[in-house]
Amino acid sequence: MRTFALSKSMPPDKVMGIARKHWSIENNLPWQLDVLMDEDQTRNRKDNGPAYLAASPRLALNVLKADPQKIPLKHKRLKARRENNELLKFMTHLR
């Protein structure tokens, strides 16, 4: 059972929808970095290495998300890995 403190009265389905949206935002980026980019497998722990290596997957994820094609990020990543022309197409959608 969950308890929520609200400033106005709302139906339960709306409250749960708001809670789900909040947690989807909280969980979305870490899940994508872990599953798509295998970020948890990095073992660099010395000096500034972790900070440098943390920026690369985030940049790559932003490049893939900027592309307007309606295909899964996993497929975009595979296309970019296989062909340089596809990688260039993805890079052209950045602003």
Image: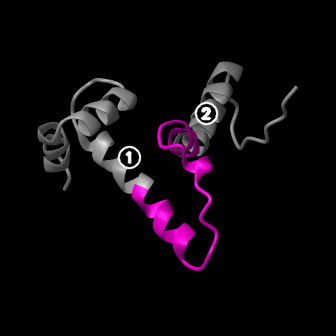
**How far across and down, in percent of the image, does residue 63 sit?**
29, 48
- Residue placed at 84% from the left, 34% from the top? 3
Q: Earlier in the sequence, mark 2 or mark 1?
A: 2
Magenta span: predominant SS is helix
Q: Any magenta on residue 41?
A: yes
Q: Which mark is residue 89?
A: none
Q: Mark 1 points at which residue?
A: 61
Quarter occupied by residue 38: top right
Magenta residues span: 30-56
Label 2 neighbour load within 10 Å: few <14, some 14-19, many 20+:
few
Q: Which mark is residue 18?
A: 2
**How far across and down, in percent of the image, does residue 73 sit?**
37, 32
Q: Any magenta on residue 55?
A: yes
- Residue placed at 62% from the left, 59% from the top? 43
Residue 37 lies left or right of residue 46; in this view the side is: left
Vertical order, 78 against 41 (above or below): above
